[in-house]
Image: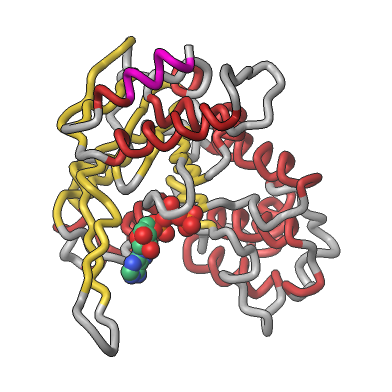
C-alpha cells in the first residue's frame, strides 16, 4: 500500500487573502505558506493544528472554494487547475466530498433524508434500484433504513445528521472525503462513534480521508498519517505513530502536551512551561526552508530563523 501513488497531493500550496476594510489600507493574510502533503489511497491523513493555522483553508481549496495563490493540487497526479473540460471537473467534484463541522450546514431543512440521498443516488448510481440503494446506504452509516428516509434534518440528532452527510458521500461514490472537524459540534459521547464510522468507510469502502482536527489525540484513532500545521505551514508530518507518539518538532510537542494525557509529564513550573511555549511558537512561526527526514517517512521543518530557540526549548522539555 505504501508504494501506491498518492490520490491527492498538495505541492507548495500557498494562499494569501487580501482583506479590504471599508476604512484604512488593505492587509494581507498568509493563510497557507507552501504546504506540501500527500494523501495515500485508502488511508486517512490527519491535518492537525490550533485555530487559525490554515487547516480549513486547505480543505476549502481542495474542494475548490478558493483558488491557490500559487502551488498545485494534484488529484491522481493531475493538476485540478488543468481540469478544463466540464466532464472532468464534474468527476472531480463528485470524487471529492466535504463533510463540515456543522452537520446541519449541508442539509436543506425543507427536504427529507430520502430527498437528499435519492437525488444523489439517481444521479450517480442510476443503475441501482433506488429503494434498495437507499436502504443499503443508510445501513452502511448505521442509520435505521426504515424510519430515517421520511425524516427531516431537524428530526435527527447531530450525530445522525453527520451520518447522513457521510451517506451522501457514499451515494455519489466519493473517493476522498475532506472531513473538517466533523465531530467538534457533537456530544462528546458520540464523537467516537463518528470516528469509528469514518474508520469503517476507509477500511470497508476504500475511501481516503483528509481528517481536519485541532485534537491531536483523535488522529491516533483514525489516521495512518498526520501532518501538523502552525501559522500556515506544515511543521511535522509522517506516520501518526511517530508524529503523535514521538513528536520531534517543538510545536508538535507543545500541541501534544496540551492533551490531557496522564502519561505526559511537564517538567518545570507552569510559568517556565509557558515561557518555553512562547519560544517554541516564535521559532515555529519562522519560514520553513525545508524538511528533514528524522526517521523513515517522518519529516520535521527546518526553520529559517528561530531553530536555536526550538532546540533549546526541546532540551529544556526533555
Ligand atoms: N475567506 C477568508 N478571508 C480572509 N482571511 C481568511 C479567510 N479564510 C481564512 N482566513 C484566515 O486565514 C487563516 C487560516 O484560517 P483557517 O480557517 O484556515 O484556519 P483553521 O486552522 O482552520 O482554524 P479554525 O479551526 O479556527 O477554522 C486565519 O488567519 C483566517 O483568519
Quadrant of residue 233 in the image? top left
Magenta-span inclusion, residue 110: no
Q: Is residue 243 above or below residue 231?
A: above
Q: Position of residue 306 (x, y in %)?
A: 24, 30
Give the residue drawn at x 77%, y 52%.
187
Q: Position of residue 301 (x, y in %)?
A: 26, 28
Give the residue drawn at x 35%, y 52%.
58
Give the residue drawn at x 50%, y 43%.
211
Q: Which sits in the foreground, 95 or 44?
A: 44
Q: Position of residue 287 (x, y in %)?
A: 20, 39
Quadrant of residue 94 in the image? bottom left
Magenta-span inclusion, residue 316: yes
Secondary structure, magenta segment, majority class = helix
Boundaries of the magenta span: 310-317
Q: Which sits in the foreground, 293 or 3?
A: 293
Q: 317 left or right of 84?
A: right
Q: Quadrant of ligand 1?
A: bottom left
Q: Which sits in the foreground, 119 or 265?
A: 265
Q: 132 left or right of 268?
A: right
| Residue 268 in view of the camera | yes
Quadrant of residue 290 in the image? top left
Q: Is residue 10 above or below residue 57?
A: above
Amino acid at each position: 500500500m505504501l508504494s501506491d501513488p498518492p490520490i491527492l497531493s498538495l505541492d507548495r500550496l500557498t494562499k494569501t487573502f487580501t482583506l479590504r476594510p471599508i476604512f484604512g489600507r488593505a492587509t494581507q493574510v498568509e493563510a497557507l505558506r507552501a504546504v506540501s502533503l500527500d494523501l495515500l489511497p485508502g488511508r486517512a491523513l490527519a491535518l492537525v493544528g490550533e485555530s487559525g493555522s490554515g487547516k480549513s483553508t486547505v480543505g476549502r481549496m481542495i474542494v475548490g472554494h478558493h483558488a491557490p495563490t500559487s502551488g498545485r493540487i494534484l488529484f491522481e497526479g493531475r493538476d485540478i487547475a488543468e481540469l478544463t473540460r466540464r466532464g472532468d471537473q464534474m468527476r472531480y467534484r463528485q470524487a471529492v466530498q466535504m463533510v463540515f463541522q456543522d452537520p446541519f450546514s449541508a442539509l436543506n431543512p425543507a427536504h427529507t433524508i430520502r430527498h437528499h440521498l435519492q437525488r444523489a443516488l439517481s444521479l450517480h448510481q442510476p443503475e441501482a434500484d433506488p429503494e434498495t440503494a437507499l436502504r443499503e446506504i443508510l445501513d452502511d452509516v448505521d442509520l435505521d433504513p426504515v424510519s430515517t428516509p421520511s425524516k427531516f434534518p431537524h428530526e435527527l440528532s447531530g450525530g445522525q445528521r453527520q451520518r447522513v452527510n457521510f451517506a451522501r458521500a457514499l451515494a455519489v461514490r466519493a473517493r476522498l472525503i475532506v472531513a473538517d472537524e466533523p465531530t467538534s459540534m457533537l456530544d462528546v459521547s458520540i464523537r467516537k462513534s463518528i470516528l469509528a464510522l469514518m474508520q469503517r468507510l476507509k477500511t470497508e469502502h476504500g475511501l481516503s480521508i483528509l481528517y481536519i482536527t485541532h485534537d491531536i489525540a483523535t488522529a491516533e484513532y483514525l489516521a495512518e498519517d498526520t501532518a501538523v500545521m502552525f501559522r500556515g505551514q506544515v511543521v511535522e508530518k509522517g506516520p501518526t505513530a511517530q508524529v503523535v507518539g514521538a513528536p520531534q518538532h517543538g510545536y508538535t510537542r507543545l500541541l501534544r502536551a496540551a492533551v490531557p494525557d496522564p502519561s505526559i509529564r511537564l517538567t518545570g513550573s507552569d510559568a517556565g512551561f509557558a515561557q518555553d511555549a512562547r519560544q517554541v511558537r516564535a521559532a515555529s512561526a519562522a519560514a520553513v526552508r525545508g524538511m528533514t527526514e528524522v526517521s523513515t517517512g517522518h519529516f520535521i521543518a527546518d526553520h529559517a530563523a528561530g531553530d536555536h530557540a526550538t532546540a533549546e526549548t526541546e532540551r529544556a522539555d526533555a
